Image: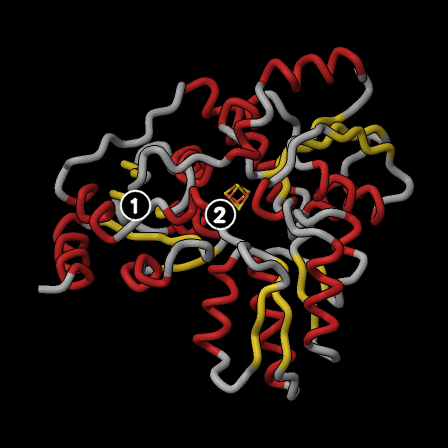
Amino acid sequence: MSSIEKIKALAERQNALVLAHYYQSLDVQACADKVGDSFALAKYAKDTDAEIIILCGVRFMAESAKILSPGKTVYLPAPLAGCPMADMVTPDDVLLLRAEHPDAAVVCYVNSSAAVKAVSDVCCTSGSAVKIVNRTSERDIIFVPDRNLGGYVAEQCPDKNIILFAGYCPTHHKISEQDIVNAKAACPGASALVHPECRAEVRKHADYLGSTAGIIRRAEDLYAAGTRDFLIGTEIGVLQILQRDLPDANVRSIGSAFTCPNMKKTGPDDILACLNGEREPIVLDAEESRRARLTLEKMVEIGG
Ligand code: SF4
């Protein structure tokens, strides 16, 4: 039996669902019941009747699934798969900023720990950040943890005063303006689809800025309309998905090493380890989880 067959058989027997983020390896994605971006996977987990959720991604993603589905058993197959950006901000950092800016609302990117969500007012995704900030009544907005996504929001929401935290995604932040300039020069006329976790000087060269799911959708739409040359400004997992699904397209990355090491820590054996009882499920403090759920529900309520 192949690993995939073993995973499918064990998962069915245990009423378990395997979910994989777009940045996971194609091997892991092939084992999954659903592939998506982080909040979409957490919502999908909540809406299913599966009792066990195996979330192939990084820790904050498994935490989000647990926050929305407190009664389910949620596993992170690679226990050491963290997110350096999420780890850059602590609840104390947020509380300090709140003390310095008492009239501000705290908007936190879903790429943050449960503890940080618990001390924030509302969450946002990369796709909903502009809408959430625009629909938040306060003029002053503390945005954590990503200074690049926050900077993009500030550009799009000129009526708001965005107070940025200094965090960043090491994978997206290391892409330079020269990288995208070189990629465009090597492939003139290609559509550059870029994630807003990239720096401002990279974003300004993009033809489209959007979330991971948004980039995939936009590439598929452009492809259907006849576009064949694409430059992808996000993690290599998305590049690999598009190279697989748009067979006669020329899909290239704007950076030579656009890989998130933490997203590549999971392999099919780690999924099997969850199903064989060799991993500990995610456990969250009940009150922290309840408060974090309010910030996620607020995002949904105001349109995120
Ligand atoms: S790509 Fe960046 S934000 Fe996403 S998990 Fe990796 S380090 Fe975190």
Quadrant assignment for the N terminus: bottom left
| Residue furthest right in the image | 159
Spot occupied by residue 219 in the image (x, y as percentages of width and height)? 60, 73
For ligand 1, tell me if the residue under mark 2 lies within 8 Å. Answer: yes
Task: Report crowding for label 2: few under 14, some 14 to 19, many 20 or more residues within 10 A (C-alpha).
Answer: many
Camera-side residue of 287 and 254: 254
Q: Secondary structure at mark 1?
A: strand
| Residue furthest left in the image | 1
Asked if residue 31 is positioned above or below residue 302 in the image, the reply reads below
Asked if residue 107 is positioned above or below residue 158 in the image, the reply reads above
Q: Residue at x 42, y 40 (%)?
A: 58
Q: Residue at x 61, y 46 (%)?
A: 125
**Residue wearing tag 2:** 260
Q: Is residue 256 left or right of residue 77?
A: right
Q: Secondary structure at mark 2?
A: loop
Q: Is residue 101 left or right of residue 214?
A: right
Q: Is residue 206 left or right of residue 17?
A: right
**Residue wearing tag 1:** 54
Q: Is residue 274 left or right of residue 178?
A: left
Task: Determine the CA span between mark 1 and mark 2.
Answer: 20 Å
**Amino acid under label 1?**
Ile
Camera-side residue of 247 and 71: 247
N-term-proximal mark, 1 vs 2? 1
Asked if residue 230 is positioned above or below residue 170 in the image, the reply reads below
Q: Residue at x 80, y 28 (%)?
A: 163
Q: Are marks 1 and 2 in contact (CB under 8 Å)?
A: no
For ligand 1, tell me if the residue under mark 1 lies within 8 Å. Answer: no
**Amino acid under label 2?**
Cys
Instruction: Tell me which corner region of the image, top left, top right, bottom left or bottom right, holds residue 24.
Output: bottom left
Q: Residue at x 51, y 29 (%)?
A: 113
Task: Report crowding for label 1: few under 14, some 14 to 19, many 20 or more residues within 10 A (C-alpha).
Answer: many
